[in-house]
Amino acid sequence: MTENIGFIGLGTMGKPMALNLLKSGYKLTVFDVEGSAIEALVSEGAIAASSAKEVAEKTEILVSMLPASQHSLAAAFGPDGYLSGLQKGSTVIDMSTIDPDTTRQIAQGVTEAGGQMLDAPVSGSSAWATTGTLTIMVGGDRKVFEEQYSLLNCMGTNIIHCGEIGMGETVKLANNLVAGVSMVAVTEAFALGISKGADPKVLFEVMSKASGNCWTLQTRCPAPGVVGDSPVNNEFAPGFMTDLMYKDLGLALAAASQEKLPLALTAIAHEQYGATSRQGFGKLDFSAVAKLLEMNQNV
Ligand code: NAD
């Protein structure tokens, strides 16, 4: 395979995703604002670009994996952004989790430059990015989705077309709402049980086999020493950072407010992650929200 793919944003997620494209045989031209992130990919066989614009000039399929809306906007519309170098007929796939309205704004810019766009945010950890087993939620024209399916399949195993442009982001925000709220619920359950003398291992065993079972319980049990690879046993190394969960729940609330939809639990969970970040734990895994309930203060 000689197809030349551009990749912008080579951080926690972007780096392993880009590596999987290289391993699948694609030629890769890469850019990140951090030079060291580019060098790490070049040492694996990628070609360095000095700007997002240069990536667009050298490739016809561009993937981006950036932290938040402002970064996706800068990479697209900034002075050296990819829109200033986009070739007609190019496809942009933004895999960042951002505001659906921002996605549509960027898509309009891509269309005006003669290209086409998919939004394709992902669910899963950096470990899933490494193994190429992400779940990918895609918005945009179905024909473009089908054209890019095999590329996306190098990075994920569950690739689902969710509707028109921006709908991948909407579905992603709905998914993360469940993860964010349920993490707070699991934490409260353990705080209550432990404060009343329950054995955390018994709590986990019962909840795993009862109606309290959920993904956050299984991957992020907040009591130390119960689930081997839970972040609490590794100084809350992410995983998925508290600041990213705060951002995603904020995006969900902003989208809901457009519909005057009262997402009460989401609002409370959003405040909890904000408070966790204010205490200095924003870069820790989002299960560090347990620290607010005086759990795991020394972890
Ligand atoms: P990250 O901060 O680790 O990486 C982002 C990279 O983008 C960095 O290397 C940064 O230097 C680069 N960057 C920022 N602005 C840029 C610009 N204008 N041009 C080029 N490069 C730029 O973030 P991440 O954890 O990889 O997350 C990326 C996205 O994936 C986020 O939207 C996040 O919500 C989402 N996500 C993350 C996870 C996770 O577990 N980390 C899981 C699912 C989804």
Image (cartoon, rainbow, N blue to C red):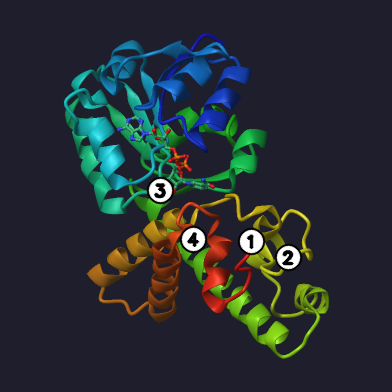
Give the spatial CA distance, label 1 vs label 2: 9 Å
Can you identify the residue that label 2 sits on? 224
Q: Secondary structure at mark 2?
A: loop
197 lies left or right of 144: right
Ligand 1 is found in the corner quadrant, namely top left
Q: From this viewpoint, which residue is outermost toward the front?
A: 298
**Label 4 sits on what residue type?**
Asn
Can you identify the residue that label 3 sits on? 97
Q: Secondary structure at mark 4?
A: helix
152 lies left or right of 215: left
- Whether residue 114 is visible here, answered yes or no, is no
- Residue 226 or residue 62, whichever sits in front: 226
The C terminus lies in quadrant: bottom right
- Whether residue 213 is visible here, answered yes or no, is yes
Q: Nearer the viewer, mark 4 or mark 2?
A: 2
In terms of sequence position, does the residue under pointer 4 or pointer 1 come before the other? 4
Give the spatial CA distance, label 2 vs label 3: 30 Å
